[in-house]
Every structure is written in structure tokens, then in C-alpha cells.
Image: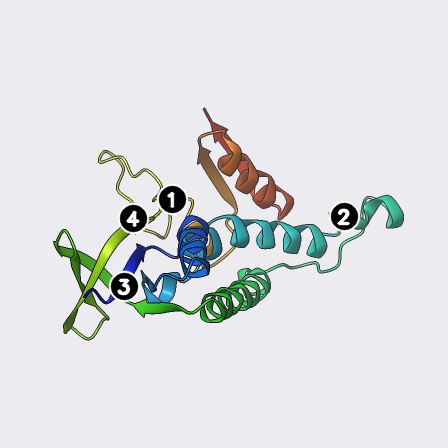
Amino acid sequence: MYDYDLLVLGSGPSGQKAAIAAAKLGRRVGIVDRRDMIGGVCINTGTVPSKTLREAVLYLTGLSQRDLYGSSYRVKEEITVSDLAARTQHVITRQTDVIRNQLARNRVAMITGTGRFADAHSIWVDGGSGRESKVTFDKVVIAAGTRPARPDSVVFDDRTIVDSDGVINLQAVPRSMVVVGAGVIGMEYASMFAALGTKVTVVE
């Protein structure tokens, strides 16, 4: 007898949907993810933080209200990272709580930690204390998400050279910024920081 009929690795949108769908069919389901990554990349470093940051920038710079109040309108003259981070963290925390409640309502067990396979039907889960516990399952869904590309030729110091996940952790609004890549994510951050007064150069 296994601990779970289905074990899902990763609690992002795909992992959540797989876990809840199986639970609704009467299966015993567990979902594994790190404590700081409940909701996956989407909630913690991707879609939700970037869209929240964008809305905060539009509001604080007055860009969304300038049709009414004129081109010089600004809610706050000096915008700091703290102004932006407070709103972003509030939304992340709220969304994480929503996900926890949704999983609990559907009787999906939340297992906090990182997992590594022991064999085809079990994993070891490290909850952060250094002690591992074994979890067994009949079927597994791997929905561990993705990370931004980090070329070996680039030395990321997470201070002056950051990837798209690290942008929301900057300590100050930079005076200048080079964005490498003119895709959706690159242009989104380029536009936001330009609105904050940063001199932005996009390389593509």
C-alpha cells in the first residue's frame, strides 16, 4: 500500500490542476514543494509578481491617470523599491494562502520540502531540517517548473547582474539598466523601469 495514489512534484498551476483533478476522482493525493515556493514560479517570481509590480508602477508614477490629470501627474515623487516590494509581497502572500486553502478543501496533502527519487515509487523529502522522510506513491506527476537561462559565460552576482527572477529583489531602483532579450518578459521589465526614471537599453 502506497502513501498516495498520486504524488505531484511542484505546486504551480499545472501541479495544482493535476492534484485537484485526481483528488476530485477520489484519489489520495500529495503535493511536494518548498515552503518559499508554494504556488510555483507563477506566484513567487513570475506572472503574479511582475503584473503586481507593473500595476504598482502605473499607479505610483501616475501613468494610468494622466489622461485625467495631465502629463505631469505623479502620485509619489520619489518611488523606492520598498514602495513596490510591499504591494508585491502582500499579493504573493494572499495568493499563497488561496492556494493552500484550495488544496486543503480538496483534501490534497501539502508536503513541504524538496524531493529526490529513491526508486520508481518513492522519494526522499528534505523539509529543510537535514532529516529526510520517505514518501511512497503509485503514480507521480513532475511539474517542477522552469528557471531563467543562466549562460555559463555570464557571472550572475544577483546584485548588478540578475536574471528575470531576481529583478523583484533589487535593493534600489537603478539609474541605468541593460535588458538582454526583447521578449515579453524583457520588454515588460524594460517598460516598468523606464517609467520609474531608469535609463533602459534593450539588447536583442
The mark found on residue 4 in the picture is 3
Q: Which residue is mark 2?
A: 64
The residues tagged by marks 1 and 4 sit, at their Cα atoms, a distance apart of: 24 Å
Q: Which residue is mark 1?
A: 163
Tell me the kind of residue under disc 1: Asp
In the rendered view, tell whether residue 136 sits above or below residue 154: below
The mark lying in front, picked from 2 and 4, is 4
Residue 41 visible in the picture: yes
**Residue at the spot x=52%, y=47% of the render?**
175
Q: Quadrant of the C terminus?
A: top left
The mark found on residue 50 in the picture is none
Query: Which of the two discs, 1 and 4, labels the residue nearer the N terminus?
Result: 4
The mark lying in front, picked from 1 and 3, is 3
Tell how many labels. 4
Tell me the kind of residue under disc 4: Ile
The mark found on residue 142 in the picture is 4
Query: Which of the two discs, 4 and 3, labels the residue nearer the N terminus?
Result: 3
Percent x, y of residue 116: 17, 56
The residues tagged by marks 4 and 3 sit, at their Cα atoms, a distance apart of: 15 Å
Q: Secondary structure at mark 2?
A: helix
Residue extending farthest to the right is 68
Query: Which of the two discs, 2 and 4, labels the residue nearer the N terminus?
Result: 2
Tell me the kind of residue under disc 2: Ser
**Residue at the spot x=65%, y=52% of the render?**
55
**Of 67 and 117, which appears nearest the observer?**
117
Q: Secondary structure at mark 4?
A: strand
Residue extending farthest to the top is 204
Q: Please give left or right for residue 101 compared with residue 5 in the image.
A: right
